[in-house]
Amino acid sequence: MKTRSGVNKVDIKGKATLELSDGLLYLRWNREAYIGIDVARAALEAISTLCQGARLPMLVEIQGVTHSGAARKLFPDPANISRMALVGDSPRDRVIAMLRLSLLRAGFPIKYFTSRDQAIIWLKEPTGEQADSKTLDRT
């Protein structure tokens, strides 16, 4: 793992990769991965290290991923994330995202997308205080 001066990419316990590129965090969970509390903690530590005190937008690829109850309570941490785009590609991913969005008190805007490109466009939009911080997008 490197910091601000170079390419930033981290393996998270063989379950995901986290990359910082062009001011965006990209968390790519392995397809069908199960995320327990230890993996969630490792992800949070990697995010904190790459952010170095900044709050950054993050794209999270969630195709087929499931989380333990403890991991869901721990992740995400608003200390380092300014907004989050969840990207999935199946009806199951959409249902999981809808459930997460309804229960999550993240402290930052979160949207679900089926298009990675649309998610990146949204993440790069200028930010301001938004009244609706959690939405489901059909793009």
Image (cartoon, helix red, strand yellow):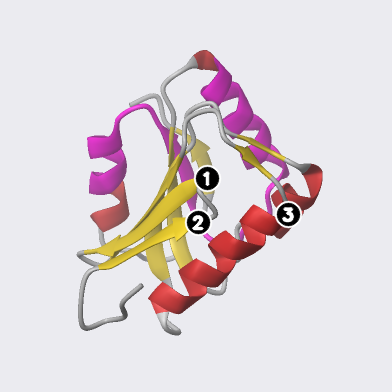
Furthest toward the front, the residue is: 14
Secondary structure mostly seen in magenta is helix
Q: Amino acid at mark 3?
A: Ile
Q: Residues within 10 Å of mark 1 (few under 14, many from 20)?
A: some
For this view, does 29 lie left or right of residue 69? left
Q: Amino acid at mark 1?
A: Lys
Q: Quadrant of residue 57?
A: bottom left
For this view, does 128 lie left or right of residue 105? left
Question: What residue do we see at 37% from left, 27% from top?
Answer: 114
- Tell me the SS state at disc 1: loop
Q: Which residue is denoted by mark 2 in the rendering?
A: 12
For this view, does 100 lie left or right of residue 114? right
Whichever of callouts 1 and 3 sits on the residue coming sooner in the sequence is: 1
Question: What residue do we see at 30% from left, 30% from top?
Answer: 115
Q: Amino acid at mark 2?
A: Ile
Q: Quadrant of residue 68?
A: top right
Q: Which residue is denoted by mark 3 in the rendering?
A: 37
Say whether residue 111 is visible. Answer: yes
Residue 94 vs 34, above or below: the answer is above
- Tell me the SS state at disc 2: strand
